[in-house]
Amino acid sequence: MAVALAVGLTATSVAIGAEGDSERPGRAAPVLAADVPVERLTSGGLAQGIEGLQKHLKAQPKDAIGWATLGAAYVEQARTSGDPTRYPQAEKSFERSLKLRPADENDAALAGRAALAAARHDFGTALVQADRALRVNPYSERALASRVDALVELGRYDEAQRAVRLADRRRPGIPVFTRYAYVLELRGDTKGARRVLLRALDSASTTADVAYVATALGQLAWSQGQYKTALDHYATALRADPEYLPALEGRGRTHAAQGSTKRALADLEEVVRRYPLPGQLAALGELREADGQRKQAKEQYALVGTWTRLARANGVTTDLESALIEADHGDVREALRSARAEWARRRSVHTADALAWALHANGKDREALPYAKKATADAPGYRNASFLFHRGMIERALGDDGAARRDLRAALELNPGFSPTGVREAKSALAEPSGRRGES
């Protein structure tokens, strides 16, 4: 498979003016350029760019592309800060842009809408908007990337592979390469995914790009239980950008997997302080629970509900995250409601896994097993330790101890530190295999 990694792997200019000058006292914040890759700006650069755009648009309120760029920046700020109130602001910015320039001439606003829909987990709308943007501009990087994201999250993996190949031909660059790597991972080609990311890292031209790609490499290594390699990649990311929270989170999860609880807590506490999203809150809660800090763990799980209500109020679909967290740490009936709702919207391996686990939490293991099998089979070659763990525990509940032991061992062999609480349960189950559990 030929990936055009050698072609122009340099980020679009992110601002008018030199980066260093923008940080000098007394300097005006730079104005983000059109089609800026806001997904790869540092948090400081993003905040400065938004400030500059806001001032620019006060002076030039009829700048349609400026409004579209501001909307894209709001989407990214919401994603990186965990503040979903930015999404309605993004939506208004795109609407303003489209009033100033019609949709058949405004791929920037349409691509921004696609990214917004994807950030809100409305992947059907994301796909529609990305396709609209690409009819206007077939080379829109944001639209090409959002289209791949939507197809992956909808579980349409063959189409996603074709989409990422098309994106690679049209706009080779880091946003496409990281998505190419993930599509390869979903097809079980972890070596190919690593090769793509390493070549992208070698060609990264900004500190933000280095942090972004090195973190993707760290996440891939962690998922395969290669903890030393993962820590090396996270160190590279944090040297490039010490404030890059995905790398800090990855380092914390890796320390937890290695049993370095004190280091893991320090990292994850800092992440949650600045980035209080459900996955991060649950990760910290599970680490505290495994460390015997049950009261503190419950506090973290309770905060998930607070964030979920805020996110839903701002148009974010949270059912996938809610299903998994509620199944493990909250209201199992709510977990099943959320999982069924998400399965009705999109049928990916992740939603199959969430539905299987929610059914298991409600004692419906016979109904759960086919979904658990889909989660481990529908993306050929893809192996996920959490999926294997969930399938193994469902098989154990049904009394199929041979299959349960096979899958639980496979989970621990693949990633022996995939979850502080899950690992403990898997080891306990392997030590004392249980028979059939009662079903509702």
Image: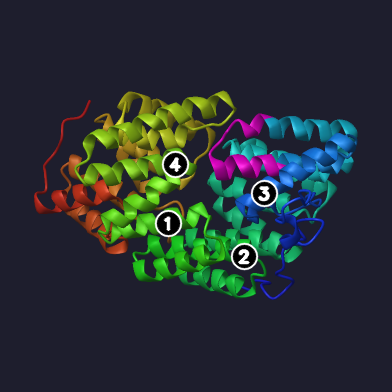
Residue 129 seen in the figure: no
Question: Helix, strand, or loop for circle 4?
Answer: helix
Residue 348 seen from this side: yes
Q: Which residue is mark 3?
A: 46
- Please name the predominant secondary structure of the magenta segment in the image: helix
Say which quarter of the image contains residue 231.
Answer: bottom left
Residue lying at 19% horizontally and 45% vertically, measured from the top left: 396
Q: Is residue 343 left or right of residue 162?
A: left
The residue tagged with tag 3: helix, strand or loop? Answer: helix
| Residue named by callout 2 | 207
State left or right for residue 179 relative to residue 362.
Answer: right
Amino acid type assigned to the residue bearing label 2 in the image: Thr
Q: Residues within 10 Å of mark 2 (few under 14, many from 20)?
A: some
Q: Position of residue 415 (x, y in %)?
A: 31, 60
Q: Where the C terminus falls, by quadrant?
A: top left
Q: Pointer 4: what residue?
A: 273
Name the amino acid, label 3. Leu
**Residue at point 18%, 54% (across, down):** 405
Task: Write the residue at 71% across / 51% down.
Answer: 142
Residue at which label 1 appears: 250
Residue 83 shown in magenta: yes
Q: Earlier in the sequence, mark 2 or mark 4?
A: 2
Residue 173, percent from left and from top = 69, 64
- The residue lying toward the viewer, choosing from 55 and 115, is 55
Viewer-proximal residue among 144 and 72: 72
Measure the C-alpha gap from mark 1 to mark 2.
18 Å
* Amino acid at circle 1: Gly
Q: Nearer the viewer, residue 315 or 16?
A: 16
